[in-house]
Amino acid sequence: MDDNAKTSESGENTAKKESSDPGVAPCQPSSPETITGMSLEKIIEITGEFEHLNELVMLHLQQAGGFTSVDGYFRIVQPILDLLEVEIRVRCSVGGLNQQQMKLVIQDWIDQEIKACMDKAAALGK
């Protein structure tokens, strides 16, 4: 008998549940296309939002006075990535997201952050 087959006596599914990998996006599958168990880097890659995210990073770098060192770069980039990860986790906790839905979540978040950066620069007169 197949591992995924139901027992004839109880009607319960005998398939073993897979354990989830800690430290990855918490989206639960709602369809075969749902993004689950991926690193932030992989999610950005499959959604095609790398260049858009890079635009946000470059705005932050410009506002911080430009590239000064590798350490300085990471001090600017890491909080951006952390905030994006939190946004994805919050949005995924509502339900599983497929690739297109994830792309829209990331795209919208980046657009909001870019607007906030531009508003801040305008307020400072830059």
Image (cartoon, helix red, strand yellow):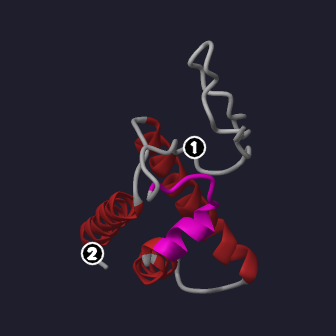
Can residue 60 be seen from the camera position used here?
Answer: no
Q: Nearer the viewer, residue 46 or 13?
A: 13
Q: Relative to 66, say whether 21 is above or below.
A: above
Query: Dot 2, crowdedness within 10 Å: few (<14), some or many (≥20)?
Result: few
Residue mark closest to the camera, 1 vs 2: 1
Q: Nearer the viewer, residue 51 or 36?
A: 36
Query: Which residue is pictured at 73% across the width and 81% down the height?
Result: 70
Q: Which mark is residue 26?
A: 1
Q: How many marks?
A: 2
Residue 121: x and y in percent read 32, 72
> Which label's residue is closer to the chain start, 1 or 2?
1
Query: What is the secondary structure assignment of the residue under circle 2?
Result: loop
Q: Is residue 43 magenta?
A: yes
Query: Which residue is pictured at 52% across the width and 79% down the height?
Result: 61
Can residue 83 be seen from the camera position used here?
Answer: yes
The Cα–Cα distance between marks 1 and 2, rounded to whole angstroms, is 41 Å
Residue 96, picture quadrant:
top left
Residue 49: x and y in percent read 43, 76
Locate residue 115 relative to residue 22 in the image: left or right: left
Residue 67, picture quadrant:
bottom right
Locate residue 45 relative to residue 124 in the image: left or right: right
Query: What is the secondary structure assignment of the residue under circle 1?
Result: loop
Q: For the residue marked with disc 1, what is the amino acid? A: Pro
Query: Which residue is pictured at 33% across the width and 69% down the height?
Result: 114
List the residue tagged with mark 2: 125
Q: Relative to 52, say whether 1 is above or below.
A: above
Q: For the residue marked with disc 2, what is the amino acid? A: Gly
| Residue interval drawn in magenta | 34-46
Residue 93: x and y in percent read 46, 37
